[in-house]
Image: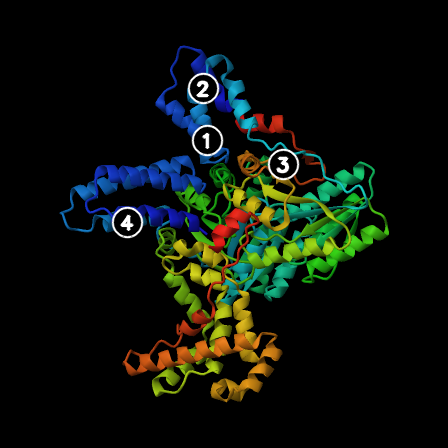
Amino acid sequence: MFDSLSSRFSATFSSLRSRGKISKDDIESMSGQIRQALLESDVALEVVDSFVLDIKEKAIDAIASMQAGTNQANAIFEIVNASLVEILGGQARRVRFSKNPPTVIMLAGLQGAGKTTLAGKLAKFYADQGNTPLLVASDLQRPNAVTQLQVVGASIAVPVFAPEPGNGVGDPVKVAKAGIEFAKAKQYNMVIVDTAGRLGVDADLMKQASDIRDAVAPDEILFVVDAMMGQDAVRTSQAFLTGVGFDGVVLTKLDGDARGGAALSIASITKRPIMFASTGEKISDFDIFYPDRMASRILGMGDVATLAEAAKKAFDGDTSAKLEAKFASGEDFTLEDFLDQLSAMSKMGSMSKLLGMLPGAGAMRKEIENFDEGEIVRTRAIVESMTPSERRDPKTLNGSRRARIAVGSGRRVSEVNTLLERFSAAQKMMKQVRQTGMPAGMGAPAMAPPKNQAKPKKRSKSGNPAKRALEES
Amino acid sequence: MGLFSKFIAKIKGENSFTTSDWQELERELLASDIGPGLTQELLAMAHKVKSENAEAALIQTLTSHLSQKSRQLLTNPDGTTVVLVVGVNGTGKTTSVAKLAAHIKRSGASIIVAAGDTFRAAAVEQLQTWGGRIGVEVIAGKANGDPASVAYDAAKRAEEILADYLVIDTAGRLHNKSDLMNELEKVKRVVEKTSPVSEVLLTIDATTGQNGLAQARIFSESVNVTGIILTKLDGSARGGIALAIESELGIPIKWIGTGESESDFAAFDPEAYISGLLS
């Protein structure tokens, strides 16, 4: 997400960089472009205008005090970056844990924002860190919301407190209160209260939400908001702020292609930080929101920090240590190692998501979106159709073995050949790197071979013949 | 028609419309989610209009952006009318399926629905609860099963019992996930082995911003969307994105959702919508 915003910013800055000396007019025109880009990204006008005015003033001050020869474009870039980080909430804030457990987190938001799914993700996130969360089913409104939470809870082995069947039956305030008592009695150290979706304009339901709040005295109230939300984000977030109050914002569906302007508006208007972001359909597609990293992504600098963390999480210690040892001892990198890497990579998430975190991703957005994830599956199928000894020593792969592998993996022999050629090229490259004495310690991110395998495949999708011809040319 | 009322009052009187008045008008227009392009067009228009017909001229401009296509439910004269309901996660597909089914049932036609959202936890149960409430048979498969097979079974069943309508719910999906879009195309293909899909309805959340355009465009490329259900119009959002979609893609809004109960559902009324947008 934020990608189209990011490509607009990239274009603006590259035109700025191409100038030797930046004039006031250049800053005016940059401000105009940024304004347009932000408006197209659903950022509220008042936020856009104050943001643009702020960076314009700072930029003009900066170039006035700057000596000739200093890199003005970079200085302006830094100003925009800093303002973005600030508007997104500055430092990443963590959940405040209560001194007297359980720590109570209450979720609130519009219908369909993704509260129930998020409740599960949040519970899993904290359970993985050694906490003992309890989910409380206080959405008694939407048909089978309770069942949904129970299914989610079961899938992550987190208990769900659901004394009422829901579907309009039961009192959500009582359930929430009883949930806290239950958690205290059973010594859960965290309670996550799921509530029904409600509109900011629905006074009765806002009252109910504040009643739940008063009943459970939450340590954190999180406002859950869809990243695709438009201008109404301003009104709705203000309504929730006055109606129930909230301490932080959670952005959901960030894996879409929305430009996420609502996030900027909400953070800026309510002065509440965005604390978490939900980025996919899997329960693990969830992370702390880092304003600085998001600003980098918006400005097309990529998000290498998140990428590195994802890699660290996916490549377990053993695999990395084994690879490092191998590399240091001068042993060959084999197809078995390659297979380990492929499976670790698929744990990190989709290829398009990973590529999207690289610097300059904004410029290759189309290619990334059209990335054929099946390529990795197919590559894996080929390698998995080999015997362990073949994987260790690909030289033994003669014609008939290759034919067998092709049949086994359902691919063509030519694809098996291509894979092996690329693999041996990668192997040679690794040897060279070692001989030229580059430092070891690159166990985890030794990702060159898979990336070679996985060339983005361009597929024409347009039904318009003229457009297709253009895409294919 | 509040959005322009200040503007009109001022240009009718002797007062001039000040810079800050223009800014306010711009903010209001943008706040309705019609998008920066249409906003600029309306502002340019407002700069030119004569006082006596200002309001009418602006409404006419907005109206000229509406789709010219029919807003009736497309039907299949030769058998079961199959309606596929698609959309992004959380836009209100399951609720809309139930409301549409109740609406069709009230008209006296026979109808069954298919619980094609096999992905989200308890989505099948959600539709079954609705089915019980509105008295409509729900065809369901296994959780995490193949949605295409559920849809196929439902199409077969509809043919067997000569149902007038079959409404198929599908899992929410982000339009930029090509694998999920391929899955949706497969659902449609498989159903069409039995009956043609007459109508593909896309649910758009009224609170959605400019991303709604991308949703409509990509879902259309994939499964040829024939109409839109604009949901959650009972909130403070004005749903201006729907106008942007009609204007840019020509897909007609057919239904609106205005609440959580089955009766909070109505055929789209363009005039009321335009005046709502401006109020």
Q: Amino acid at mark 3?
A: Ile
Chain of the residue under label 1: B
- The x and y percentages for residue B138 are 77, 52
Query: Front-most of B188 and A353?
Result: B188
Q: Amino acid at mark 4?
A: Phe
Tell me, yes or no, whether the two marked residues, 4 and 3, touch with CB atoms within 8 Å.
no
Q: Earlier in the sequence, mark 2 or mark 1?
A: 2
Question: What separation in Å lies between label 3 and label 2 (alpha carbons)?
Answer: 29 Å
Report the residue marked by disc 4.
A77
Have a look at marks 4 and 3 and say if they share a chain. Answer: no
x 51%, y 42%: residue: A244
Chain of the residue under label 4: A
Above/below status of B129 relative to A51: below
CA neighbours of label 2 inside 10 A, class few (<14), some (14 to 19), many (20+): many
Chain of the residue under label 3: B
Q: Which mark is residue B39?
A: 1
Above/below status of A310 relative to A423: above
SS at mark 3? Answer: strand
Question: What separation in Å lies between label 4 and label 3 (alpha carbons)?
Answer: 43 Å
Report the residue marked by disc 2.
B7
Question: What separation in Å lies between label 4 and label 1 (alpha carbons)?
Answer: 29 Å
Question: What separation in Å lies between label 2 and label 4 (alpha carbons)?
Answer: 39 Å
